Image: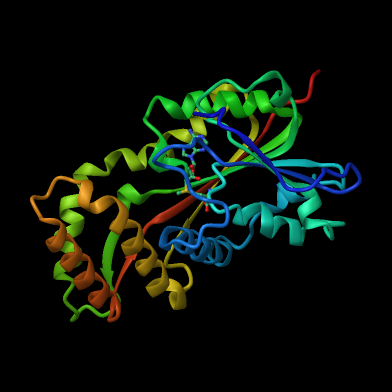
Amino acid sequence: MGDVGTVSVGDLNDSVPQEQVDLGPVGKDVYMLTGTGVESNRLNQQHQLLKKTVGYLLHPEVQEHITTSSSIADIGTGTGIVVLDLEKSLPSSTQLHGNVSLRVYDAKQPPCKELRNKYDVIHLRYLNSGMGEEDWEVVTQNIFTMLKPGGYIQWLESDFGGARGLRANPFTTAHVHEEIHRIMRPQLKHWSFAPRELEDILLNQGFQDVRQEVLSTDRIPELRRAWSLIEIGAMEGFFPGLRHGFSEGECREKLNAMKEEAQGDVYVRWNIHVWIGRKPLPN
Ligand SMILES: C[S@@+](CC[C@H](N)C(=O)[O-])C[C@H]1O[C@@H](n2cnc3c(N)ncnc32)[C@H](O)[C@@H]1O
């Protein structure tokens, strides 16, 4: 893991923003860059919803520090949608494929010499599913090492452990949502670890100007249904693996029943957390 290969798309050009995309470990958790699978579509739809709900891709404070020579990494990039999108919004960004490079890197492993003190900005989003509680500190330390002094980290995670099915209309029933969330809640507690602990982990690592912003997926009422369907889409991947005693067919039926409820006045909400912080400049 982490050393399987490097994909370069064109040559990097020093006069425009350089974007380094790290694909994450190759293994059962790998996402293909140009994959057309259901999961890739879901990640790309989720990206659009996140941009609208959070209101930015890069936090304004981070964006302010980007210059035409900045080097930006997206760790655990999935379909690569973040860098492809950033490329459009950053200054002098007309040479998309000349500025994007990909490499395989396991963020839990210490970065090689070439990656140390290299980036002005490191962006991370939704590494949650691949992280144990002990990994957050390790990854934070590795990111710190990879940033240039004065460089920024931006990390977004959702508090999926706190997801709840809500009723926009009090007379609507949400039996399937209630049943499924009752099953999931005790098994997904670890998905609330980052929302609870990451701010302190960043501070203990030595990041300065650490800020945490918290938003809710139901902030924009018109997007509630879309968020619910994204959640149910993600559950298609992990719900069958939880403890519940359902057969594969029964899992499918339950998730289909959730989708039906989500067509009415039932929706799922959870909090989205964004942390930013800066590696100190030398005194
Ligand atoms: C749920 S996807 C999120 C993709 C993307 N960040 C987004 O928000 O659309 C999780 C990604 O994290 C990557 N990942 C998981 N564990 C990782 C690790 N230890 N190091 C680097 N990437 C990792 C996976 O390969 C996958 O690309």
Give the side of residue 176 with respect to residue 72, left or right: left
Snapshot quadrant of residue 145: top right
In front here: 4 or 50? 4
Quadrant where the C terminus sits is top right
Q: Is residue 239 above or below residue 55?
A: above
Question: According to the image, what is the colour scheme of the structure?
Answer: rainbow
In front here: 159 or 184? 184
Q: Is residue 30 above or below residue 224?
A: above
Q: Residue at x 29, y 58 (%)?
A: 236
In front here: 9 or 186? 9
Coordinates of residue 23 in the picture (x, y in percent): 57, 41
Coordinates of residue 280 in the picture (x, y in percent): 73, 26
Q: Residue at x 81, y 50 (%)?
A: 98
> Hey, which residue is sitting farthest right in the picture?
15
Give the side of residue 186 with respect to residue 279, left or right: left
Coordinates of residue 222 in the picture (x, y in percent): 45, 78
Coordinates of residue 37 in the picture (x, y in percent): 44, 61
Q: Residue at x 39, y 42 (%)?
A: 129
